[in-house]
Image (cartoon, grey):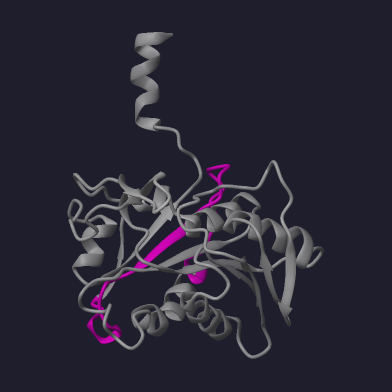
Amino acid sequence: MRILITNDDGINAPGLKTLEAIAAEVAGPHGEVWVVAPAFEQSGVAHKISYTHPMMIAKMGERRYAAEGSPADCVLAGLHDVMEGNPPDLVLSGVNRGNNSGENALYSGTLGGAMEAALQGLPAIALSQYLGPENIMLDDYFEAAAVHGADVVRALLEAGFEDRSHHYRLFYNVNFPPCGAEAVKGRRITPQGFRPDTRFSVEPHMAPSGRRFLWIKGGNQHRASAPGTDVHANLEGYISITPMRADLTAHDMLAPLKGHLE
């Protein structure tokens, strides 16, 4: 199996090393793992592509490249330049430092990479490691992802990605709970949740030069979403697996709006 991996934390991020190990285990001794990752951190860029300017790409080693772009850019670079003519069997994005459950999924560059792969017609999985007081002080806070990641990927490959009823290809959002590997209780198939009253905001700061700057500030990541959703499952110690598509249509509103507006 040939696997392309990317992330949004950058080519030197520890989570990428975790994903490389997961990918190598899944690919097997005769497989190949290719890395095309951002040269610098790209957290929060979602599905951004560098449409209006070129990006530099550099070979860092055998099957290892850094691109000055977003995770979606890196997937495009991997498919149409680095691996052109011999595409991968699977694209993995992550392992993100921090969760991409709930509303975080909408901002996530990690998911942006997986989404682009799905739009390109390839099986894709985004993987993220929730952080909290039970794992942040571990020697390796990616431990849950490192121990359970390969099994989850293999299980999703067995479940499959084919969905002929929809034009937008399925991809998966996987979040590992904020605990050590031994404390993981299992897996849950979940919808995307929503943390009430957890929103991004800004925090102003004055630079020594007297100029005013704004830092983007996140909300409380340990406020649970509704039971049965991804955030709730993660905070209960479960790996959440959320099937996703790039279709943003509110299908439940089509019929009601037709009755009012057509």
**At 54% across and 68% down in the image, what residue appears?**
10
Q: Is residue 29 above or below residue 61?
A: below
Q: Percent from the top left, x then y, of residue 23?
A: 55, 79
Which is nearer the eye, 164 or 126? 126
Residue 173 included in the magenta stretch of the image: yes
The N terminus lies in which quarter of the figure?
bottom right
Can the viewer see residue 243 in this picture? yes
Which is nearer the eye, 216 or 194? 216
| Quarter holding residue 84 | bottom right
Q: Percent from the top left, x then y, of residue 25?
A: 54, 85
Residue 162 included in the magenta stretch of the image: yes
Can the viewer see residue 192 in this picture? no
**At 41% across and 44% down in the image, what residue appears?**
211
**Residue 1 vs residue 59: left or right?**
left
**At 25% across and 55% down in the image, what residue appears?**
229
Q: Which residues make up the magenta segment?
A: 157-185
**Number of callouts in the render?**
0
Q: Percent from the top left, x then y, of residue 3?
A: 63, 73
Q: Is residue 159 above or below residue 52?
A: below
The C terminus lies in which quarter of the figure?
top left
Q: Which residue is outermost to the right?
A: 85
**Residue 165 vs residue 255: left or right?**
right
Q: Percent from the top left, x then y, of residue 198?
A: 23, 48
**At 44% across and 54% down in the image, what residue appears?**
108
| Quarter holding residue 29 | bottom right
Q: Which residue is outermost to the bottom?
A: 29
**Residue 52 vs residue 190: left or right?**
right
| Quarter holding residue 180 | bottom left
